[in-house]
Image (cartoon, rainbow, N blue to C red):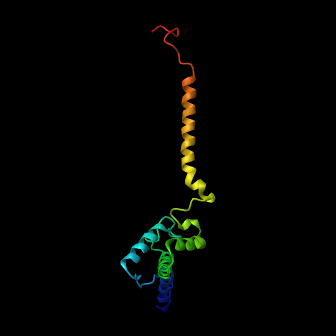
Amino acid sequence: MLRTLLLLLALCLPASALAQVSDPTPLTFRDAAEETRFNALTHELRCVMCQNQSLADSNAQIAHDLRREILKLMQSGKTDDQIKAYLVERYGEFVLYRPQVERGTWLLWFGPALLLIGGAWIVVRVVRRRSAQAVPGADDGQEW
């Protein structure tokens, strides 16, 4: 009986260790303007764990921590740009949904347009080459 109880305890322990524990205290805002600013900012930033979710939408523990950190930075008087710069310094450009247009991100910003222009150029060349080929005339020697 004791052995069975220990086995059940051992099986339950890893599941409880893997469960996410989030801070149950809700975020408190000074006023509605601060809450609006916070919501706008967290929708512009990407969760570093989830990768395709914003901080506002993510339920990961690091997203909870980052939201608390952002609120703390906001309440200490930091601007949105300063908060973004802090997060970029800590986590890289990946945290921004819209990275800055810099030398390192030119391909990201202008790559799709270059691919579209290159594809259009190839299509134009193929169409011109095919239209330049001799088209058989009406009198090609066949009787029909």
Percent position of residue 97, x then y: 50, 63
Percent position of residue 81, x then y: 52, 70
Q: Is residue 125 above or below residue 87?
A: above
Return the residue nearer the eye: 54 or 14: 54
Return the residue nearer the eye: 67 or 71: 71
Query: Residue, x 56% and y 51% (percent of image)?
Result: 110
Q: Is residue 48 above or below residue 137?
A: below
Query: In the rendered image, is residue 57 in sight?
Result: no
Q: Is residue 126 above or below residue 85?
A: above
- Image position of 139 (left or right of 106): left
Percent position of residue 95, x then y: 54, 68
**Residue placed farthest to the left in the image?**
32
Return the residue nearer the eye: 94 or 19: 94
Query: In the rendered image, is residue 66 in sight?
Result: yes
Return the residue nearer the eye: 118 or 47: 118
Q: Residue 105 occupies which quadrant of the picture?
A: bottom right
**Residue placed farthest to the bottom in the image?**
2
Q: Quadrant of the C terminus?
A: top left
Q: Residue 127 occupies which quadrant of the picture?
A: top right
Marker count (numbered): 0
